[in-house]
Image (tube, rainbow, N blue to C red):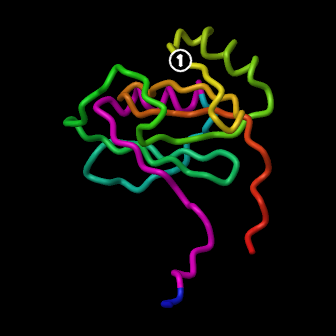
Amino acid sequence: MPTPLPLRGLHHVAVTTRDPDASLAFYRDVLGFAPLERPNFNFRGAWLFRDGLQIHVIENRTPEADERIDPRADHLAFAVDDFDAVERALREHGIDYHKQVNAGGIPQIFFHDPDGHHIEIGIYPPTPAFK
């Protein structure tokens, strides 16, 4: 069997947006990411950082927003310890969400960023040791 790539970890996730200012505000004010310096690309965007993860917001005026919240769609997932605090914050920000407990018993909340990208929040058990 071929050797797997020598990955060190996840560096960043890129999301496309029609409105970089709205996306920057969302990821900063709702999810608590801090802006980083970004090279002077020939397109608008932002680099953001929190807890070892970067999100790169990239202007692209063509993405289609989907208003449906679909737990099986591509999504970013963030772990939390306080589910009630997440619900309170989403209500304070006026963000619609879908709440469920999955078949594995994991409580989850799904919602969208300003461009319709799905975001999952959950209370996850520890990741088993890799053998």
| Quarter that holds the C terminus | bottom right
Q: Which image quarter: residue 31?
A: top right
The residue drawn where x is 43% and y is 31% is: 23
Residue farthest toward the front in the current orientation of the protein = 103
Residue 73 in the image: state x and y as whole percent.
41, 38
Residue 9 inside the magenta-drawn segment: yes
Is 12 left or right of 88, judged from the image as shown?
Answer: left
Residue that carries the numbered disc 1 in the rendered image: 97
- Amino acid residing under circle 1: Tyr
| Residue occupying image coordinates x 48% and y 90% | 2
User: Where residue 108 sits: x, y (%)?
Assistant: 64, 29
Q: Which residues are magenta?
A: 4-30
- Placement of 118 over or under 14, stated as above or below: above
Left or right for 78, reference 113: right
User: In percent of the image, x 74 and y 35: which residue is there?
Assistant: 123
What's the residue at 58%, 41% (across, down)? 77
